[in-house]
Image (spheres, helix red, strand yellow):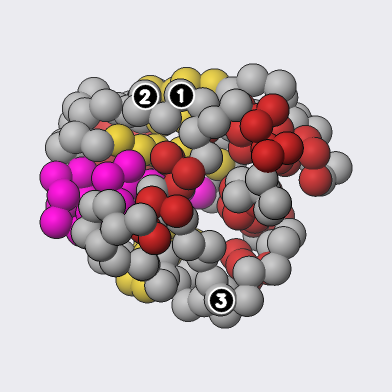
Amino acid sequence: MRFTFATVQYESGDWDSAPLLAANVIDAVARYTSVDVAPSGAIVPLSSEALLRYPFAFLTGHLPVRFTSAERAMLRKYCDRGGLLFVDDHNHDVDGVFHKTCTEELTETLGALKPIPNTHPLYRAFFTFRDGPPTTTHELNGWGDNLVHDHLQGIERNGRLAVVYSSKDYSSEWSFHPENKKFLSVDNTRFGVNLVVYALTR
């Protein structure tokens, strides 16, 4: 079955704040793996049954997040049926409005976020990241909360990782045209490959 990168559209906030990210991760999956990947992604409303077609979904933004009751219900259904939601704070700021509101919504909907150990299979799903999640230039530049986040957070449902939450701002880090990868010594979207492969194979 062909993999399609799904970007989650939610009613509050700015869900479309990283429009170049999907194409970049799609390029990386096609470049490094044998996964049959669709050349363009899909935009999927969080409240829609269509979300259940996608084993991996991406959600980001800068602004406050407040899920509707329909969005909460579908998110529970998606995670309980085996989907993996990757949430990235485009502000990478633990005192920011996206982080505060989105983590509140996720906790109310699915349960508490907990640190994902840096030994987790996610970090060996395709490429090996021995130190856990790769650091972004936005963290190193001291933007946002001036922290380098050593761990990602997650929520398990039925003993399975269903949500991966990042305060590292991969939304900015991966928001460039794939052609520009030739200027990088190391392709910084490789961790996106791990997220997709993990979602497809666990």
Mark 2 surroundings: few (<14), some (14-19) or many (≥20) residues within 10 A: some
Taking 191 as reference, is 32 above or below it? above
Q: CA distance from mark 1 to mark 2?
A: 6 Å
Q: CA distance from mark 1 to mark 3?
A: 29 Å
Q: Is residue 41 left or right of residue 183?
A: left
* Start-end of magenta stretch: 84-104
Quadrant of the snapshot with the N terminus: top right
Position of residue 104 measured from the top left corner of the image (x, y, whole percent): 17, 53
**Comes first in the chain, label 1 or label 3:** 1
Three-letter amino acid code of the residue under disc 3: Asp
Q: Is residue 89 magenta?
A: yes
Find disc 2 in the rendering and name its residue. 16
Element carrying mark 1? loop
The answer to which of 22 and 173 lies nearer the viewer is 173
Q: Residue at x 36, y 67 (%)?
A: 149
Percent coordinates x, y for residue 68 in the rendering: 19, 31
Q: Position of residue 7 (x, y in %)?
A: 47, 29
Disc 1 residue type (three-letter):
Pro
| Residue name at image x 54 percent, y 71 percent | 132
Q: Is residue 59 magenta?
A: no
Whether residue 50 appears in this view of the structure is no
Q: Amino acid at mark 2?
A: Asp
In the displayed structure, 61 sits above or below 113; it is: above
C-alpha span from label 3 to label 2: 30 Å
Give the residue pinned by disc 3.
131
Q: Quadrant of the C terminus?
A: bottom right
Q: Does the CB distance between marks 1 and 3 fall below 8 Å?
A: no
Secondary structure at badge 2 equals: loop
